[in-house]
Amino acid sequence: MVKRCAISRRNKTPDPDQGMWTILLVDMDGFFASIEVVRRPELIGLPVVVGADPKGGAGRGVVSTCSYEARECGIHSGMPISRAYRLCPDSKFLPVDMALYQAVSGRIMKILASYADTFQRVSIDEAFIRVKTDDPEDVIETALDIKKEILAKERLTCSIGIGPNKLVAKIASDVRKPDGLTVVAPYEVCEFLDPMPVKKIPGIGKKTGQSLKSMGIETIRDLREYDARKLVLRFGKWGYRMHDLACGIDRSEVKEDRTVKSIGRELTFEEDTSDPGLIHDSIDALADATHRALSNAGYLFRTVSVKVRFEDFDTRTRSRSIGFPSSDPELVKSISKNLISEFTGVAKIRLIGIRLSNLQMDNGSPGATHYHPCMAGITRQTSIYEFIR
Ligand code: TTP
Ligand code: MG
Ligand code: MG
């Protein structure tokens, strides 16, 4: 049954190269929280929440992550910090120390890259590793060595998914956590994916999930067995890709991405506000902080985006591009103010953010630095007081 899905589809032949390579996805466990526990061993075994200040339940902002002990109380990333406080007021609540996490991430990425034929960092705590072997014993040994080295050097655990392609490795990495290792051989792919809900496939979110449900498709097997032509009629090209993924076919390559895509900063107000003066000052402060990060990294920008989250959590973004690469902080400010003017006076605002993208290296900049894998696409959330006090 398993092989049939990959081989019997006339128009979907497996990648001829697929047998030679194996892909690992390494994802650190409870990353920010685990790093905090390493520097404060007295927190071992306790619920630890990293994120905004809960202020006795009245705090704003969100949970960045939490330890597995805190997860047992129902706390998770992205949850309002006030809710996390209500669920487990005895948790140790700690602020985000991004500089520390980036430094640890940089060292871990170096370790991971040393095991790879090709390496792709995906986020601050996650990377794909492609190794040239399809011998499961070899790959498992590599995975165990990676785990041992990270544990010995950083005292942190990770979970690893191993599969014939990125899709399978990614889904496998999440099957057993923390400190998991899940191996899916090419002939096991359909058996592995079939029972899972379709939302396990990257790109299938709430909306697509609902559309698929209305078509009677709930599991990956339902999707795989569905007529691909009908999916294309409904979803366009994405329907075809979705069907491929449900069959365990993913030809996307592990490739090193050495460019920083964007640099952003955002802040949550202490209280929802429609005060134009406060919004104006905050934009100035955010623009300065974002610009500082941009020039420290040695980049120029072409696009400025602003993000606004209203009191009801409705979130909007607007962007404007200029015809030339710039490093001018005043331009960041003026474009941002212009873009945000559409949203002021509408409703109270909870959060604002500025992002600079379409970046290129500023080779003439004295502050130019080489790419650091931890700088890609980072948004740092911070308290407004850090900027305007
Ligand atoms: P994840 O790998 O998604 O989560 P995690 O490492 O904390 O836990 P898991 O064991 O489930 O992998 O994210 C990596 C880090 O990114 C996380 O430690 C904190 C940060 N992060 C946020 O700041 N906000 C978020 O919403 C998420 C999902 C992550
Ligand atoms: Mg993680
Ligand atoms: Mg991750």
Image: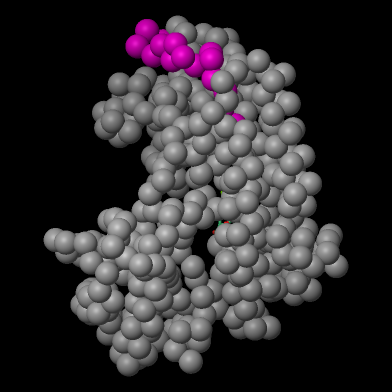
In the rendered image, which quarter contains the N terminus? top right
Residue 194 percent across, percent down from the top left: 57, 24
Asked if residue 378 shows in the view, the reply is yes
Residue 164 percent across, percent down from the top left: 55, 22
- Give the residue at x 48% y 92%: 389
Q: Nearer the viewer, residue 130 or 1?
A: 130
Looking at the image, is 57 positioned above or below residue 80?
below
Asked if residue 263 shows in the view, the reply is no
Q: Nearer the viewer, residue 245 or 31?
A: 31
User: Residue 31 sits in which quadrant?
Assistant: bottom right
Numbered-mark total: 0
- Give the residue at x 77% y 39%: 148
- Give the residue at x 27% y 32%: 236
Residue 70 percent across, percent down from the top left: 74, 61
Outermost residue, left side? 323
Q: Is residue 179 left or right of residue 76?
A: right
Q: What colour-coding does the image apply?
A: one colour
Residue 270 percent across, percent down from the top left: 50, 85
Residue span colored magenta = 9-24
Q: Is 368 colored magenta in this rendering? A: no
User: Residue 88 sits in which quadrant?
Assistant: bottom right
Q: Nearer the viewer, residue 213 or 277?
A: 277
User: Residue 150 sits in which quadrant?
Assistant: top right
- Give the residue at x 66% y 36%: 160
Question: What secondary structure do most residues of the magenta stretch adopt?
Answer: loop
Looking at the image, is 49 positioned above or below residue 240?
below
